[in-house]
Structure formats: C-alpha cells, structure tokens
Amino acid sequence: MQYRRLGRAGLQVSELSLGSWVTYHNQVDTNSAKEMLAAAMDAGVNFFDNAEAYALGRSEQVMGDAIKALNWPRLNYIVSTKFFWGLSRGPHSANRKDTLNRKYLMQAIDGSLQRMGLDFIDLVYCHRPDPNTPIEETVWAMSDMITRGKALYWGTSEWSAAEIRAAWEIADKHHLHKPVMEQPQYNLFHRKRVEQEYAPLYDDIGLGLTTWSPLASGLLTGKYANGIPEKSRATLKGMDFLVPGLTDQAKNQAVGKFQKIAASLDCSVAQLAIAWAAKNPRVSTVILGASSFSQFEHNMRALEVLPKLTADVMAALDLISTPLAQ
C-alpha cells in the first residue's frame, strides 16, 4: 500500500480506502464490518469513509461500533462523514429542506460524533452544494467546526469547480480553515469533472481528491451485461435510479472490451477499473465498497494491477472509455 497526501494537507491517506455507502447496515452488520475493517487495516488501509445520510445514520453507528471493538489507536486511522440531507426533519423543523446552514451543521457534527463514538471526525464534507444558503455561512460554520476541535479537515462532495473556488477564496479572505478536499465520482465512464473541470484547482488551491464509485455502481464488474441479477445493488430499496445506467447497452459492450484487456493482465475488470482510477496522480485515495469479505479481498488486489498499467494499456482503455465518458 502506498500513501498520498490529501492535496496540500500534511495528512497522508492510503491509495485505496473503504467506504460504507449502501452496504453498512443494509448488507453489512457490525460483525462483518469489524472483519472487513480489520482486514483493511492489515492491508494498509487507513481511511474509512461514511456519511450522516447513509442508512439514515445507522451506517455511522455500525462503523463506530466496529472501530470501538477493534480498539485501534486513534492516530492510526482516518474517518470521514458528510452533511447535507440531515435526519429527523419534521414539518415544523427550521431545516425543512436539504441544507448547509449553520444551525443544521452545528447539530449534524454532534450527531455524527455521538453515533460514531468519537471525540472528533478527521474529514468532514459538505455532501452537496446548497443554493439556498450563502456560501459564506457554510464556510464559517465548517471552519468553526474545526476551530472547536470537532473535525480536523473539511471539504466538499460533488461541488462545481466554481463553488469550490468561491468557498476557498472566502476562507482565505477571512483567514478561516480552507476546504482541503473534494469527493467526486470518478471511473472509466465518469471522467470529465476530475480530469477537466477541476484541473486548475489542483495547482491553484492544492485540492485533494477522495474519489467514489470506481466501479460505476457495479457496472464495471461485468455482472450487468445480461440485466439486473438478483440481490445486486440495483435491487435494493431506493436504488432503482441506478438501473438505466447499469443496463446501458453501449456501456455494457464497452465493459466487454475492458474484460479482454483485463484478461491480458491476468485480473478482473473490477480490479482493472479500480487500478485505473488509482493511477491518476491527482487522486489521493480511491474509496472501495464491499458487501462481503470475499468481495473486499478481490477488490484490494487491484494494487497488484497498478504496475501493469503501462502507457499502452492506458491508451487502450482511453480509446474505449472516452467516447462514453461524462
């Protein structure tokens, strides 16, 4: 396992990390989470990603309980959470809409700390941009979160380059804690934001990336070539929005071509796709998801594929993916 700086921050994260979206609580209980977290740490993973909205807070609870049971030294691991959609909003709530206002953010961090059983969260993200709250208010609230010792670094997820730059400039102007990282989707079919839109930010403000969905929600495993298999992610409650993308004929044909390249490298197409995302030097870490221990072990072997991604292999992958990439 190699470690990369989180943008210009001093913090170093493992090039592969483990996330909990969809899986924790829904498919992975505390005992299974403990097993995978322990194996991940043994493999050199030091970053574990979460969010308040995952399983309506229960994902944070599962991860927190598993970490407590493992009794790791706090210096040895990095955890994250993300805020935007919120929990327990009633009809008379002051935050009836998805938001990043100060009232919500100040309460959200306390809730996450309680569920995870921690004194502080290492990385906190604004999970989506909020057009209804001034960016200044959000920046001040996130900076205050760090000043109060409840978080160490803050960043964004799926914000535009213009929004990230605006937040950074406000923080810079007022000598506040600046956003350090962005968490965008990045895979062979979703490339333009990371490779084009954010390009000026890497050198201008030192933006780091903790990317998600390297397998395009499972499309890049090849298992959706003949439709939606039983017990797959797309069959879970609330995940039906993934079906059109997973059954896209042109993309599934492209996956078939990726499989031929993977076979020539003696790996699976999933391992190839993960290694491809990690190959980008602008990516601080690639977040993996796994619903079983065997799947986790399989995906971690992408590290063995990284050295095989020569210029010729990367060019062949580009030729297939670029026409279909967003």
Image (cartoon, rainbow, N blue to C red):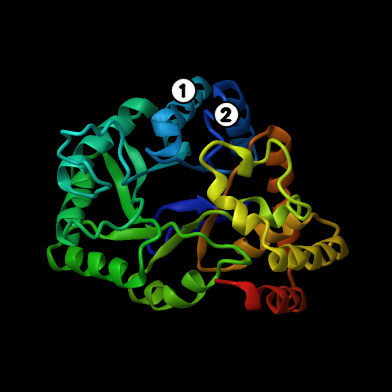
Residue in the image at 39% along x and 78% along y = 200
Residue in the image at 20% along x and 34% along y = 91
76 left or right of 276 in image = left
Q: Earlier in the sequence, mark 1 or mark 2?
A: 2
Decide: few, some or many residues near mark 2? Use Cα within 10 Å; few <14, some 14-19, many ≥20: many
| Residue 18 in sight in this render | no
Q: Judging from the image, what secondary structure is the residue with disc 1 in? A: helix
Residue situated in front as seen by the camera: 320 or 313: 320
Report how many numbered discs are placed on residues in the image.
2
Residue type at mark 1?
Answer: Asp
259 left or right of 250 in image = right
Pointer 2 residue: 33
Residue farthest to the left?
174
Residue type at mark 2?
Answer: Ala
The image shows residue 305 at horizontal and vertical percentages of: 75, 59
Residue in the image at 39% along x and 56% along y = 157
